[in-house]
Image (tube, helix red, strand yellow):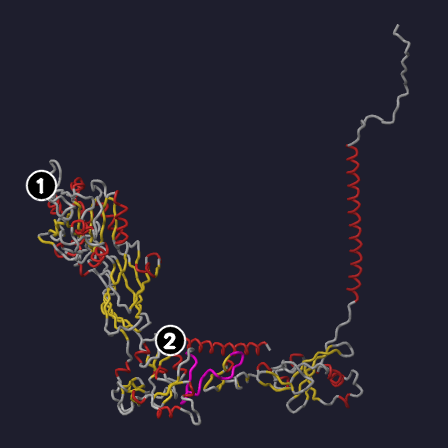
């Protein structure tokens, strides 16, 4: 019975799983249906799970062309062969994939900067289908002995006088320190003061020649000067910087942003290579930014172009200071990492600026710049230990996401997925990048985007190709005879009508659509309803309307059919056990009835003896209908008014098998209605599972012995009895153990009683003794005298006696 129950549960579980899967597939396909796609291209743009059936005879009568577009599983369930489903998928193809460089400092092999690879792959093509992300892995490895270009940009206003003296020997000293990091190091120098207009400087002739007061010898003010382009000669740096003189200006903020912009955009004059680019900005003051130029009458915004003539910035009086956002853009475009070496007073200001400029660092400059070398080394290590990916401007149809796999198992997503920190030289990190097209470009053109680590010149070039059409569209037949004598292009199993033509086969012109003659073809015989009021008549054919629930569909030549008005059971269409087609349920196997609510499974009707309905009824829709009025219950096994089979046949079996019992004398007359077979043991009795109804019996005979038998009736009504030939008789009692047990019990009980009495007496004596001891302790008389003793001598005093 347990096995039967388990089988029933498994069957229902399987049916339920199929229904859930079918429902989820239809729900997933609703987006495809809602797209109302008129072509295969429109269909595949509706979602990544949408497919187009190009089978010519796929559509039923009344179904629009858009019904060819649906979820892949739904199309298969509707009878579209897999080879006729258009479902192009996106892909990726790597075009350039050089391995990252493994190279040690001091290696004999001297590589050119462009021969060193730190990022992999370098170029790839992604074919994107709308809604389907394409994923690729990007590897980054910090190369050892990677070349570095460092440009030192210094504020030469008067307050930096003592700092200049220390910077004059910076070249060779910094060269020695940087040799520990790279064997290919170049250094350059530039200086800045302020715009050469009022009110930033004094424009009197004397002040223009020497802006300093007293006997100080200062150079004329200037905006920005490129003193030394990048060079590997440290001595030359010392020589040229040693010739520089302090200048002066009127206000405290300096014009450093003008200088940074020119250093960033004048790559040829500065001499930047495609290597690590560091810009050290040294000052002890704040900065002017966009809008401050109005004080000097300068209103034109900075154009972000190079204006160096003879290494001097010549347009400071013409263009305003650049904005911070403009600087960020140019520094990023030119892969320049900025180190702000500023005094303690302006640390807070430049730390805020650092937060706005990616790949920048701030160091505290001592009052005379004596710590500038260590500041540069520390800042470089800080900048190079972090890699941050950035991408070029994305087309509006494309989104991108990052996931980082950094050192020590640290993984991040979203914005933090763009970066990895604490990277040492030689460490390798990986990024997983997803690129998704949310829609097709209107012009359908391909796009190119680039991804690169901030501060590095290397980048990944990604060519984006959009899948907006199906392959079968390119195989279309223009002016096809299949489209009403050439009125359209036959592609992907359907007609795409020429301008001015409509209909599934382009059989109508737009002028004929609303004519009454056409409407006559859309009415059923003896009916005035056009398309059963469930559709529109287009070109003499009904195009059924769509319902808000996309799983509910009208169909048929006159839209007279639907899949949601069938009989229901338990609140489900067709009881959940069938499919509604044209308002009639088509039941799944093992179900029948108008609502498929009648199960043909006989498992619930199986009685304990293995017979359907105990052989006394019929199984209808999984329920027993008992034909014998004496029997009832779910399997017709309950009989309230009749003896059990075992009790009914007990006496006859006893008299025939063992020749005793109440019917011993009349056995031959009353007990010959069954065939009897003797077996040696209970194991040899027939077991449940045979086709005939079977009852196992255990009864007691006149000698109080148990005997075992089975009773069964075959399909011909013949009864059979199998009986165990030897009854099981209980053995008589063993007297000796019983008597011994009784005697032992009496003795043990007596001993127990004696022990209890003895224990109680001991407790009583101890209590009495303790009481005596207590009274003895409390006695007030001396234990050495008799309390009732009285002396025999009496002393009497003579009152007249005076002692004479």
Q: Which quadrant of the view contains residue 676?
A: bottom right
Q: CA distance from mark 1 to mark 2?
A: 79 Å
Could you say where residue 56 lies in the image, as x and y percent from the top left?
Answer: 34, 88
The answer to whether any part of residue 501 appears in the image is yes
Judging depth in this view, the residue of 492 and 353 nearest the camera is 353
Dot 2 alpha-carbon crowd within 10 angstroms: few under 14, some 14 to 19, many 20 or more: some
Q: Is residue 594 above or below residue 244?
A: below
Mark 2, secondary structure of its residue: helix
The residue under label 1 is 206
Residue 126 on the magenta span: no
Q: Is residue 261 above or below residue 619?
A: above
Tell me where the magenta segment starts and ends, as one range.
Answer: 550-571
Q: State the residue at coordinates (79%, 83%).
A: 662
Q: Which quadrant of the view contains residue 122?
A: bottom left
Question: Which disc, if any, is residue 718?
Answer: none
Could you say where residue 605 lies in the image, as x and y percent from the top left?
Answer: 60, 82
CB within 8 Å, label 1 to label 2: no
């Amino acid at each position: 019975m347990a096995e039967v129950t388990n089988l029933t549960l498994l069957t229902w579980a399987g049916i339920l799983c199929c229904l859930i899967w079918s429902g989820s597939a239809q729900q997933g396909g609703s987006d495809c249906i809602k797209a109302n796609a008129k072509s295969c291209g429109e269909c595949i743009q509706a979602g990544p799970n949408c497919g187009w059936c190009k089978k010519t005879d796929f559509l039923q009568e009344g179904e629009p062309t858009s019904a060819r577009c649906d979820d892949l599983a739904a199309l298969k369930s509707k009878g579209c062969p897999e080879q006729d489903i258009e479902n192009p998928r996106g892909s990726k193809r790597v075009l350039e994939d050089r391995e990252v460089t493994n190279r040690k400092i001091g290696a004999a092999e001297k590589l050119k900067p462009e021969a060193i690879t730190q990022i992999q792959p370098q170029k790839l093509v992604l074919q994107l289908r709308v809604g389907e992300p394409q994923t690729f892995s990007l590897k980054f490895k910090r190369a050892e002995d990677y070349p570095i270009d460092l440009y030192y940009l210094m504020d030469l206003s008067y307050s930096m006088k003592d700092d200049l003296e220390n910077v004059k020997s910076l070249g060779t000293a910094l060269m020695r320190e940087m040799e520990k990091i790279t064997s290919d190091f170049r250094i350059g120098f530039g200086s800045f003061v302020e715009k050469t207009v009022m009110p930033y400087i004094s424009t009197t002739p004397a002040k223009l020649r020497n802006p300093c007061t007293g006997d100080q010898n200062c150079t004329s003010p200037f905006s920005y000067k490129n003193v030394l382009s990048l060079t590997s000669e440290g001595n030359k740096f010392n020589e040229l910087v040693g010739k520089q003189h302090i200048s002066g200006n009127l206000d405290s903020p300096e014009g450093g942003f003008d200088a940074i912009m020119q250093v960033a955009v004048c790559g040829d004059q500065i001499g930047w290579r495609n290597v690590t680019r560091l810009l050290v900005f040294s000052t002890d003051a704040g900065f002017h930014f966009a809008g401050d130029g109005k004080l000097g009458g300068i209103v034109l915004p900075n154009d972000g172009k190079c204006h160096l003539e003879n290494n001097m910035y010549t347009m400071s009086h013409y263009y305003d200071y650049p904005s911070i956002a403009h600087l960020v853009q140019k520094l990023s475009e030119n892969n320049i990492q900025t180190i702000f070496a500023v005094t303690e007073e302006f640390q807070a200001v430049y730390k805020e600026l650092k937060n706005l400029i990616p790949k920048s660092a701030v160091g505290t400059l001592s009052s005379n710049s004596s710590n500038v070398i260590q500041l540069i080394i520390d800042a470089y290590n800080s900048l190079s230990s972090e890699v941050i990916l950035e991408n070029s401007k994305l087309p509006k149809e494309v989104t991108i996401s990052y996931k980082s796999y950094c050192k020590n198992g640290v993984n991040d997503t979203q914005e933090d997925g763009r970066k990895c920190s604490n990277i040492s030289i030689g460490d390798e990190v990986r990024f997983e990048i997803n690129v998704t097209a949310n829609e097709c470009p209107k012009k359908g053109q391909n796009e190119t985007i680039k991804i690169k680590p901030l501060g590095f010149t290397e980048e990944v070039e990604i060519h984006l190709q959009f899948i907006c059409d199906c392959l079968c569209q390119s195989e279309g037949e223009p002016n096809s005879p299949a489209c009403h004598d050439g009125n359209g292009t036959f592609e992907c199993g359907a007609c795409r009508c020429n301008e001015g033509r409509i209909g599934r086969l382009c059989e109508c012109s737009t002028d004929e659509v609303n004519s009454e003659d056409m409407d006559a073809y859309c009415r059923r015989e003896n009916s005035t309803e056009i398309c059963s009021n469930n559709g529109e008549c287009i070109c003499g054919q009904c195009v059924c309307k769509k319902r808000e629930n996309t799983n509910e569909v009208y169909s048929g030549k006159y839209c007279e059919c639907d899949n949601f008005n069938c009989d229901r059971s338990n609140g489900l269409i067709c009881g959940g056990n069938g499919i509604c087609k044209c308002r009639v349920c088509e039941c799944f196997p093992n179900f029948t009835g108008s609502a498929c609510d009648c199960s043909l499974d006989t498992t619930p009707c199986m009685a304990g003896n293995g017979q359907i309905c105990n052989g006394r009824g019929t199984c209808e829709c999984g329920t027993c209908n008992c034909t014998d009025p004496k029997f009832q219950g779910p399997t017709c096994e309950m009989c309230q008014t009749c003896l059990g089979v075992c009790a009914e046949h007990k006496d006859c079996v006893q008299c025939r098998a063992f020749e005793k019992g109440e019917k011993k004398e009349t056995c031959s007359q009353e007990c010959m209605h069954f065939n009897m077979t003797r077996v040696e043991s209970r194991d040899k009795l027939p077991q449940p599972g045979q086709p005939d109804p079977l009852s196992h019996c255990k009864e007691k005979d006149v000698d109080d012995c148990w005997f075992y038998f089975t009773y069964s009736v075959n399909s011909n009504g013949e009864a059979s009895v199998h009986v165990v030939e030897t009854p099981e008789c209980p053995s008589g009692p063993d007297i000796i153990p019983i008597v011994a047990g009784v005697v032992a019990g009496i003795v043990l009980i007596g001993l127990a009683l004696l022990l209890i009495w003895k224990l109680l007496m001991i407790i009583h004596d101890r209590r009495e003794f303790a009481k005596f001891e207590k009274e003895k302790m409390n006695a007030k008389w001396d234990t050495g005298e008799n309390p009732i003793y009285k002396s025999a001598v009496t002393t009497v005093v003579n009152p007249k006696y005076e002692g004479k």
